[in-house]
Image (tube, rainbow, N blue to C red):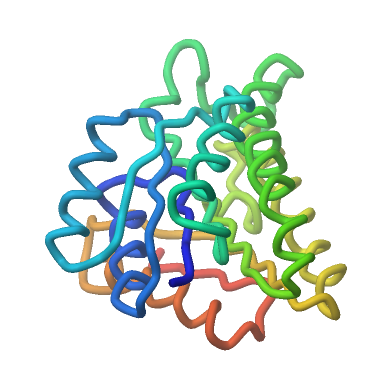
Amino acid sequence: MPTIAIVGAGPGLGLSIARRFGREGFAVALLSRNQATLDDLAGQLTRDGITAAGFAADVLDRPSLVDALTRVEAQLGPIDVLEYSPAPAGRQNALNPIVEALDVTVESIQPEIEYYVYGAVTAIQHVLPGMLERGTGTLLVTTGASSALVFPRMGNIGIATAGLRNWVLALNASLADKGVYAAHVPLATFIGRGGPETQPDTIAEIYWELYTKRDQAERLYSTL
């Protein structure tokens, strides 16, 4: 049974991606900070007949992320698909504000780089050696639209996510002849806050299409 690990899993898009892959026979590993939430989500998937388990990890605590991914492999086997999409909800506060382009400082950029870039590098570099050894694997990285489009009000976040985007596109090129596929998904939408096109189940289809077709380095999804 193949395994998908979803870093940043929550009750919206993460759960929908889990269900979409689970319906196709994947075991699902859910990773985020709150074990109780993960257990609830895994329970929902299990009731749907999907093999699933939650593994608490914090992308800002890189050893905890490595430990969680190691536990995924021990329990569910090699990770065939890594989907990285830590949600910023709850992070943007007085300590981690969204900063407009004119007001960006080194101090405002650093937390975003640690959250988006360092976390993704940690997760990907943990699973990539095994994928290369097996000659197969998929890396799907999700960011907001400021990674690929100009949103001046998201100056500090855009710097970090644009850097992550660049690396994923470079990985796509570097891995092209090695059996491993990497793709970036920038989302320009308010998930679940609109018509059918904003619903997580609809958006989750993109991830399955990317996994099966492996023909795009990037898939921008916009409802704005």
Choose top left, top right, bottom left or bottom right for residue 179.
bottom right
Residue sitting farthest toward the left: 47
Q: Nearer the viewer, residue 180 or 169?
A: 180
Residue drawn 59% across the image and 49% down it: 146
At x 51%, y 57%, the residue is 77
Q: Position of residue 36 (x, y in %)?
A: 23, 30
Question: Can you give x and y, in whole percent of width and height, for residue 197 in the image?
Answer: 29, 73
Q: Is residue 13 above or below residue 182?
A: above
Q: Depth check: 65 or 198 in front? A: 65
The image position of residue 27, as x and y in percent, is: 38, 63
Position in image of residue 162 (x %, y %): 71, 48
In screen coordinates, is 135 left or right of 192?
right
Question: In the displayed structure, would residue 4 be above or below residue 61?
Answer: below
> Hey, which quadrant is residue 169 in on the image?
bottom right
Examine the rendered structure and indicate whether residue 171 appears above or below residue 73: below
Which one is nearer the viewer's eye here, 33 or 74? 74
Q: Residue at x 12, y 60 (%)?
A: 47
In this rendering, would 41 be left or right of 146?
A: left
Residue occupying image coordinates x 82% and y 70%? 175
Relative to residue 66, is residue 161 depicted above or below? Answer: below
Question: Would residue 70 be found to the left or right of residue 45 on screen?
Answer: right
